[in-house]
Image (tube, rainbow, N blue to C red):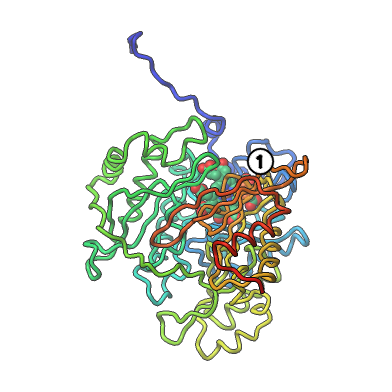
Amino acid sequence: MVTSPNVIEKVEKKNKFEKYKDEKDGLAVKDELLQFAEMGWEAVDKTDLTGRLKWLGIFYRDLTPGKFMLRLRMPNGVLSSHKMRVLAEIVQCYGDDGCADITTRQNLQLRGVRLEDMPSIFERFKHAGLTSIQSGMDNVRNITGSPVAGIAANELIDTQGLVRKVQDMITNNDQGNYEFSNLPRKFNIAIEGSREDSIHSEINDIAFIPAFKDGIEGSQIGFNVLVGGFFSAIRCDSAIALDAWVPADDTVVDICRAILNVFRDQGARGNRQKTRLMWLIESMGLPAFRAAVEAEMGKPLAPAAPEDAITDEAKSDHLGIHPQKQPGLNYVGMHVPVGHFYAEDMFEFARLAEVYGNGEIRLTVEQNLIIPNIPDSRLAAFLQEPPVQKFSIEPSALVRRVVSCTGSRFCNFALIETKQQAEALAEKLDSLLSVTEPVRMHWTGCPNSCGQPQVADIGFLGTKGRKDGKAVPAVDIYMGGKVGKHAQLGERVMKAVPCEDLEEVVAGLLQEKFGAVAK
Ligand code: SRM
Ligand code: SF4
C-alpha cells in the first residue's frame, strides 16, 4: 500500500504490559504452573512471577517475597461452609503468615501462600468448586451482586444465576478463556437486583441497575445499563447511561460479551493511565460506542427505561438480624473489622453456617460477612455463640462502616498503613463521641483507590505529608460521597493531613458535619 506523504498515520505506541502480553499471553502460565512449583519462585522468569501469574490470581508480594497472595472469585460474594473450610485449611498451613481478607469486591484473598503448593491448592479448588482464574491484571474482576440475592424481602431480581453465567462466559466455566485474557486493562462488572444499590454499581465498567421496562411497577423487570465507571490514580468517574434496557435473561450475558469484545478490539493500549473503558467511550462518542455494541450483539438495543427501580431508602449495611423473604428464616450480618480474619475464624464461620443456617455464607463490599437461612427458632442460640461476640452483629456507629484497602503491610503501592489505623481511629473516636447515624469511613493507601474513599462520608487517601519539617504519613480527606439512588462521588476537602493529627481533625468533622457530641 502506498501512503500519501500528506497523511500522517498516528500509530499508538503500546505500553510495556502490552509488549509482554504480546510475547506470551498471561493465561499461558496455567500450563507452566507445575514446572514453576518444582523449580521454586526464585528461578521463575520475573515477568511470569510478578505479572503473568496474576492471570491465575497468584500475586507475588515484594514486601513478603515467597509468600504470595491468592485472589479468588466469589460471584455475588456467595460461598459455602465447605468452601470456607477448604480455604481455612489452606491458610492454616502457613502458620503466622496465613490470613485472609474480604475485599471491596465481596471476594476473598488468602495470604502467606507458597508457590510450590499452588498445584495441589488448585486441585483442591477444582473439587470444591472454587477458582481464582483471571482475577488480576487485564481481566474482568470478581462480578458483584447484592449479597442478599435470593433472600432479601424486597428483592426485584435474584441475580445469582446471571452473575454466575457472566463469570462462566468470561472464564470458560473457570477453565480460563483466551478470548478475554488480553483486555486493554482491568474491568469491573456489577449486577444489582435489589431496590438499593448495595454494591456501588456506579463505579463499575458495566453496571446493571434494576428497572421496569416502561418505568412503571408491574411492567417487565430488567436492567438499565450503565458503562464506564472507574477509579484510577489520575481520574475517577461514575458510570454513565448507555441508554439501553435489557431483560433479566441471557441478554445480560450477551451484552457483557459484546461490550468486552468492543473494549478488547478497539480499546487503547498506549498510555496505561488512559486505557479503561471510559476513555474508549469518550474517544468513540457514546452513540458510536452504543452502535458498536449493537453490531456485536447483532440486534438493536431497547432504549433505557425512563427510571430505575432503586428506592430512596438508605442503603443497608446488612449487619444485624433481617427477616428473609422465606417466612421464618433470617439472615444475620456480622462485622469483620476491615475484612481481616484468620483460619480459626474461618472455621468458626463455616461451623455457624452449618449449625444454624443451611451452610451458606455471603460476603459484602463493606468487607463483612452474612450467615443466611437461620430459622427464627435458632436465633437465640446463634446469638449466644462466641464468634458472634467477637464479630459483632450490632457494632457501634463509628466502627460499623469502616472499610479499608490492604495498605502498606502487603501492598507495594501503599503510601501509608491503612487497616490498623482505620480500626484504631474508629475505635478511639467511638470512645469519645456519639453519633445518631453510622458514618461511612473508607481508607485507601494510595491514589489507586481500592478502598473507594470517594464513595464514603469521610474518605482517607494515603499520601506523603510534612510536619515540623519532617516527612510523615498523611492522608487527603474526601467528603460528600453518596451511595444508593442518588450516588455521587465525594470530593477532596483537605490535603496531606498528617495521620498523627487525624483524631483531632476527624473528631472536628464529625461534630461539625455529622452532629457528633462528646460522650
Ligand atoms: Fe485494587 C491494584 C487490592 C479493589 C483499583 N489492587 C491493586 C493491587 C493488585 C496492586 C498490587 O499488585 O499490589 C492490590 C493488591 C494488594 C493486596 O496485596 O491485597 C489491590 N483492590 C485491592 C483490594 C484487595 C482492596 C481491598 O482491600 O479490598 C480489592 C480487591 C477486589 C477484588 O476482589 O478483586 C481492590 N481496586 C479495587 C477497587 C474497588 C472496586 O473494584 O470497587 C478499585 C477502584 C475501582 C476501579 O478499579 O475502577 C481498585 N487496584 C485499583 C487500581 C487502579 C486501576 C486503574 O484503572 O488505574 C490498581 C492499579 C492498577 O490496576 O494499575 C489496583
Ligand atoms: Fe494497594 Fe493502593 Fe490498592 Fe491500597 S489503594 S490496595 S495501597 S494499590
492 or 165: which is nearer to us?
Answer: 492
User: Based on the displayed image, in which of its 4 quarters is residue 262 positioned?
Assistant: top left
Quarter of the image containing the N terminus? top left
Mark 1 residue type? Leu
Q: Residue at x 61, y 84 (%)?
A: 383
Q: Is residue 479 left or right of residue 391?
A: left
Residue 225, percent from left and from top: 33, 53
Residue 3, percent from left and from top: 34, 11
Q: Say how many tags the image has.
A: 1
Q: Which residue is mark 1?
A: 49
Label 1 crowd (10 A; few <14 / some 14-19 / many >=20): many
Please, which residue is most extreme toward the bottom here? 377
516 or 177: which is nearer to us?
Answer: 516
Q: Is mark 1 within 8 Å of ligand 1?
A: no
Q: Is residue 112 above or below residue 196?
A: above
74 or 492: which is nearer to us?
Answer: 492
Q: Specify whether residue 71 is in view.
A: no
Q: Residue at x 66, y 41 (%)?
A: 49
Residue at disc 1, secondary structure? helix
User: Based on the displayed image, in which of its 4 quarters is residue 387 positioned?
Assistant: bottom right
Q: Is residue 343 above or below residue 47?
A: below
Residue 200, percent from left and from top: 46, 58
Residue 325, percent from left and from top: 40, 80
Q: Is residue 63 left or right of residue 396?
A: right
Q: Residue at x 42, y 49 (%)?
A: 238
Quarter of the image containing the C terminus? bottom right
Q: Specify whether residue 442 is in view.
A: yes
